[in-house]
């Protein structure tokens, strides 16, 4: 076993350490004393096994506070070093510990701003330590390093040293790693640096863990080139620029780190960087928590970003990241903002309690947002403008102060299978020249209205469930030419569907039912085509047409309204063709004021409650309509100028034949059933199964219930007219009455 060579080097004098290194053999331990060592020549370490051991400072309590005394300090002048590092390591093994090492320019303590500025020009040439070779047997531990306007420790080529427990301050760059170096840097502090606390570039790798980087003028960490270093359990505090700044094509990993205190952006990735960023906390950013620009990509998983002054996450230019399971909250701006042509995938994130929008897209941004929770934001839940696109699916957008989803300008997203609920204003706001497809969403409980289309929106709204709004189900304004197809619009407090201004929608095959107000309201100068819709069970009129509206109603069913089925008044016109109107409490069709509708080939079943009523001054054309032959089939007021041609009253059986011939193809089979028993003490309850359509009946007599033979039920007719009405699946037919049951 080789013996350990110890050499004590006394403090004081000049070049004592460099002289000892020149003469000592490999494997020598140089034991330094407490005190100051002045070195004018570089400390060249080319022999393996050299150890330079200093004396750690001792904290002593003195008047005015604690002070560290009794340490080993090595000093050098940048002028004397002439561009060389003070400590140059080019061997397989070396150790320096418990030394304070400082490189300064001559007269630095009283140098003016001009002298300091001049010194900055050669900052890349001024270095305390430079490691060019060696693996984990090259160790710097518990050292205190400073190099004003220079580099604390430079690690290059293919070296892999261990830097442990060191404190680096007052440098331009605390630690510089480049080449193919792969250091292990742990439990270190780098602070008060004029540029970066640590910079990794080239093709370097390695691990930086449990470190603190703080009080830097530009960035705590700069990663560039093709660096793929891992930063773990590290804090970046109080930088005047970014916490982490990523450039070039770096693929570093940042995990379990904290960025807090004074900084602009927490993590900023630009150029072609492609990092992995996971389980970090980014707090109190003066700008954004995370910023991506240029062509940056990366994987961002399970991070917490809160209290940002601007957007929690800002993605712009052509950036295309993947964000998964992050929490973005309590920001002064929006949660996530995409600008330019930004894209990416955003999945499983929680975006909540931000002062502006939860998610915003501008420019030509386009991205996939899936399974995110966007709630309790003070602005919009999701906001798109300009020419933004993107797909939003399976998200929960709830309890936001403004619209749940707002689509503006020429934006055109695909929005499907989302829950848009309990907003303080509108659930789905589509305005200006927006378009896009909005399908299979649940839009409910939003206070102002569930869906509002304005401007010239050309959106397609299909297969949605729109319910439970105190402000109304769907509201179409401006000059919108949207398409509403196969939606269920129900249980809204005002009109289930209101069409105003000059809008001209195409509404087809919708279920509009169970409203506290009217079913469909069309007024202003609105037009549009309404085909194959089922409008039923409203407290007021099923369809109201007023103002100067001129809709085209074709093959709709209007049933079971608490007032009239169809009301046309004011100066409204419109064409109503092949519609079926039945089961309404007042007139099936009421024409009032100066209205001038055209009704052609409609079927009106009213059971004596009122068929077609024309008020004073009513006009219009009524041709080939069939009205049930019973009391109050027609009522015509004074001054009526309407043209009534080939319009007849018919029995129910003949009416059903007509309904069969004009049925809308997508509507489901309907069965008209009569209860021929005239006893007022009973009724027949029906249960209807889907095709084939058998009927079952029971007659209630006091407490007893007994089956009735099918002969007691008169099936008046069957037809394809009518969409599925779940509330009629178990309809009750009063004595002598008629029910329409769909299957």
Image (spheres, helix red, strand yellow):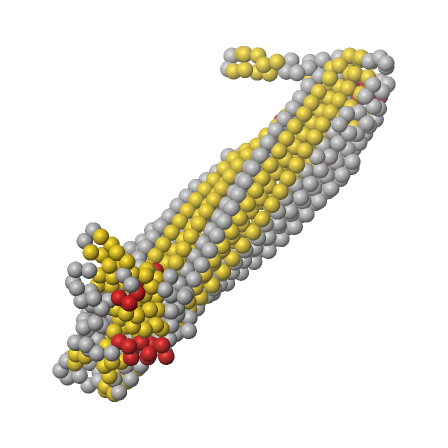
Q: Position of residue 221 (x, y in %)?
A: 62, 38
Camera-side residue of 550 and 111: 550
Q: Quadrant of residue 353?
A: top left
Q: Residue at x 29, y 63 (%)?
A: 709
Camera-side residue of 732 and 540: 732
Farthest residue to the left: give it. 638
Q: Is residue 335 shown above or below 105?
A: below
Q: Position of residue 180 (x, y in %)?
A: 76, 39
Q: Residue at x 58, y 14 (%)?
A: 59
What count of labels does the image hold?
0
Q: Is residue 253 visible?
A: yes
Q: Quadrant of residue 403?
A: bottom left
Q: Quadrant of the N terminus?
A: top right
Q: Is residue 218 visible?
A: no
Q: Residue at x 82, y 17 (%)?
A: 28
Q: Quadrant of the C terminus?
A: bottom left
Q: Is residue 222 shown above or below 620?
A: above
Q: Residue at x 17, y 83 (%)?
A: 640
Camera-side residue of 100 and 83: 100
Q: Position of residue 299 (x, y in %)?
A: 60, 45
Q: Is residue 579 shown above or below 220?
A: below
Camera-side residue of 30 and 493: 493
Q: Is residue 677 shown above or below 112?
A: below
Q: Quadrant of residue 662?
A: bottom left
Q: Is 586 left or right of 204, judged from the image as shown? A: left
Q: Position of residue 25 (x, y in %)?
A: 86, 18
């Amino acid at each position: 076993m080789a013996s350990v060579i110890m050499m004590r080097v006394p403090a004081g004098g000049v070049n004592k350490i460099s002289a000892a290194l020149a003469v000592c053999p490999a494997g020598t331990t140089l034991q330094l004393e407490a005190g100051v060592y002045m070195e004018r020549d570089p400390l060249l370490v080319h022999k393996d096994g050299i150890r330079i051991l200093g004396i750690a400072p001792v904290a002593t309590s003195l008047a005015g506070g604690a002070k560290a005394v009794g340490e080993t300090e090595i000093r050098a002048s940048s002028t004397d070093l002439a561009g060389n590092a003070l400590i140059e390591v080019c061997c397989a093994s070396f150790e320096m510990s418990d030394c304070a090492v400082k490189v300064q320019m001559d007269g630095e303590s009283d140098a003016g701003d001009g002298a300091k500025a001049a010194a900055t020009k050669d900052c890349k040439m001024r270095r305390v330590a430079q490691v060019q070779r060696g693996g984990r047997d090259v160790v710097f531990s518990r050292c205190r390093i400073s190099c004003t306007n220079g580099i604390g420790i430079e690690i290059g080529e293919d070296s892999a040293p261990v830097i442990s427990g060191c404190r680096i301050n007052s440098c331009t760059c605390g630690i510089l790693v480049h080449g193919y170096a792969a250091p292990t840097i742990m439990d270190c502090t780098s602070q008060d640096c004029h540029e970066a606390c640590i910079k990794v570039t080239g093709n370097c790798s390695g691990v930086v863990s449990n470190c603190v980087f703080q009080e830097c003028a530009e960035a705590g960490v700069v990663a560039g080139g093709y660096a793929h270093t891992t930063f773990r359990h590290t804090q970046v505090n109080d930088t005047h620029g970014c916490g982490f700044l990523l450039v070039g094509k770096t693929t570093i990993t940042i995990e379990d780190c904290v960025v807090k205190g004074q900084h602009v952006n927490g993590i900023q990735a630009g150029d072609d960087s492609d990092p992995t960023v996971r389980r970090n906390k980014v707090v109190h950013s003066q700008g954004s928590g995370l910023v991506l620009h240029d062509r940056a990509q990366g994987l961002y998983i399970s991070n917490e970003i809160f209290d940002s002054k601007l957007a929690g996450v800002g993605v712009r230019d052509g950036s295309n990241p993947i964000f998964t399971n992050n929490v973005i909250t309590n920001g002064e701006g929006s949660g996530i903002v995409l600008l330019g042509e930004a894209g990416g995938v955003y999945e499983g994130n929680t975006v909540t309690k931000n002062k502006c929008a939860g998610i915003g897209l501008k420019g030509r941004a386009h991205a996939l947002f899936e399974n995110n929770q966007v709630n309790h934001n003070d602005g919009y839940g999701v906001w798109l403008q300009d020419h933004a696109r993107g797909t939003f699916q399976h998200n929960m957008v709830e309890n936001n102060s403004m619209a749940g989803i707002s689509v503006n300008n020429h934006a055109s997203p695909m929005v499907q299978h989302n829950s848009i609920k309990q907003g303080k204003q509108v659930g789905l706001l589509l305005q200006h020249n927006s378009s896009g497809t909005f399908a299979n969403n649940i839009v409910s409980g939003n206070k102002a209205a569930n869906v509002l289309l304005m401007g010239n929106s050309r959106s397609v709204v299909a297969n949605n469930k729109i319910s439970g709004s105190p402000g109304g189900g769907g509201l179409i304004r401006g000059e919108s030419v949207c398409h509403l197809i196969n939606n269920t619009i129900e249980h809204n407090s005002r009109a289930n569907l209101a069409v105003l201004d000059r809008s001209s929608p195409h509404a087809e095959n919708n279920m509009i039912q169970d409203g506290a107000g009217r079913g469909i309201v069309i007024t202003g100068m609105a037009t549009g085509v309404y085909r194959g819709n089922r409008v039923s069970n409203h407290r007021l009129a099923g369809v109201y047409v007023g103002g100067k509206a001129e809709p085209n109603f074709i093959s709709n069913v209007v049933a079971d309204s608490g007032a009239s089925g169809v009301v046309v008044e004011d100066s409204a016109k419109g064409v109503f063709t092949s519609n079926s109107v039945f089961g309404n409490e007042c007139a099936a069709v009421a024409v009032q004021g100066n209205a001038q509708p055209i009704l052609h080939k409609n079927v009106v079943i009213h059971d004596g409650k009122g068929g077609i009523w024309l008020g004073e001054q009513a006009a219009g054309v009524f041709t080939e309509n069939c009205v049930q032959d019973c009391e109050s089939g027609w009522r015509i007021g004074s001054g009526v100028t309407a043209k009534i041609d080939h319009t007849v009253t018919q029995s129910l059986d003949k009416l059903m034949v007509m309904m069969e011939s004009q049925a809308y193809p997508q509507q489901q089979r309907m069965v008209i059933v009569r209860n021929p028993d005239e006893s007022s003490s009973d009724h027949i309850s029906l249960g209807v199964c889907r095709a084939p359509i058998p009927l079952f009946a029971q007659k209630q007599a006091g407490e007893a219930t007994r089956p009735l033979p099918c002969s007691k039920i008169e099936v008046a007719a069957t037809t394809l007219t009518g969409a599925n009405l779940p509330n009629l699946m178990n309809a009750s037919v009063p004595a002598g009455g008629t029910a329409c049951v769909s299957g």
